[in-house]
Amino acid sequence: MRFEDLDIDKTIIKRLTERSLETLTPIQENSIPAIIEGKDLVGISGTGSGKTLAFLLPLIELIKKDSLTNALKAIVLLPTRELVTQVGEICNGLIAELNIKTSLIFGGTDIETQINELKNNIDIILATPGRLTDLIRRGEVDTCHMKILILDECDRMLDMGFAEDLKFIESMLPHGIQKLMYSATLSPEIRNIISTTMKDPKIVEIKDEINIPLSLEQKLYYVEKKNKEMLLAEIIRKFHNETTLIFTKTRKGAESLHHSLTEKGFVTDHLHSDRSQHARDTIVSQLKNKELTILIATDIAARGIDIDHVNLVINYGLPQENETFIHRIGRTGRAGRTGLAITIAEPDEKERLGEIQKLMKKHIPVIENHTYAGVSLKKAMIQADEKIAGKSPKKGYMGSKANGDYYRRQKMAKRKSDK
């Protein structure tokens, strides 16, 4: 199905065409007609499925046809400031020629400025739950004429501790309004929200097809922890002119790596949820304008980064969830460009990487002959194999088939020499 076949404003179709978007994704095709009909809806799909347009297009169409003016009609809740900004940019791009006003609400910025903006007859609020809760409690958000509530990445909002904020916001809305929810999973918590707050919703579940672009090359380096940072530095030097995004597991890890690489002479910056909004906006702007080429980021902070010219992604610490690995490497090789994703792992992460490769249905080539691939690394890799296989080391035998074959060949050679 094509976007031009939908009963939506022609100026929006034009905007989509300018972005080379012509055909609906499965989540869009199964969501948009039901939303326009006014049904509650639960969309279960992963990153890159097109769910943002799945709710924005019908939302804009419903608001455009609403006869009520000068009143808030919709709230879109998202887990992070970066996602509010990203979805806000997409929304504002679509409504540029329409008489629809939006306001982006999140913490880390001056609340008085946001309060003043809300006085300008806003139609759609895109917000993080915490700051919106604060504004509602202050009496600065009038929800009396609300028509639709959208929870995007609801599972992530729950993971981040926003359950009470979501419950409060929902309690302040008019009874019976249309509700949409998008999530990557149908967890018990999500099912509870559906059963207690939604009315006979249509459930659209899209089974993710993991498609790694052919233009995206991957490499895997195993290294001992003591040499991990030195190997990273060596790789960065090799690709010093490339726009590079380095992922770490934690905020502390991002800060530590930033300071360490700075001491080694690299120009880097770091992005995580505790950075001020001004700092985060500045960093993303510098990356977009190619004023910054090396950024170290955590997964939560990086979710709003949508930059086509990221040439290299480095997984310096594996993510908490295997699916997030795919989201990470998808930051490069975008818009038809070539890209490279390098994973630097310790031997005891081999089993986890096996799970990730199984999920991707793709083997990651291992670079074995690198600077720090010494004897001790080989022993550590053998131990990792033994742990995976559930074997215990035997005296005179170091595990793994390859190593066992080596010892057998040695014995055979000795027998021949004895004859």
Image (cartoon, grey):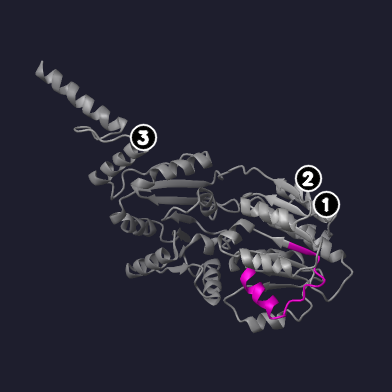
Question: Which of 191 and 84 lies nearest the eye of the viewer?
Answer: 191
Q: Nearer the N terminus, badge 3 or badge 2?
A: 2
Q: Which residues are magenta?
A: 128-149
Quarter of the rendering containing residue 62: bottom right
Q: CA distance from mark 3 to mark 2?
A: 48 Å
**Residue 165 screen position, x and y as percent:** 64, 68
Asked if the residue under mark 2 is in contact with the one under mark 1, i.e. CB atoms within 8 Å, the reply is yes
**Residue 288 screen position, x and y as percent:** 55, 66
In this orientation, does residue 184 appear? Answer: no
Crowd tier of the residue under label 3, counting other residues whose Cα lies within 10 Å: few below 14, some 14–19, many 20 or above: few
Q: Which residue is mark 3?
A: 389
Q: Label 2 amino acid?
A: Met
Q: CA distance from mark 3 to mark 1?
A: 54 Å
Asked if the residue under mark 1 is in contact with the one under mark 3, i.e. CB atoms within 8 Å, the reply is no
Q: Is residue 164 magenta?
A: no
Q: Nearer the viewer, mark 3 or mark 1?
A: 3
Q: Which circle marks residue 32 in the picture?
A: none
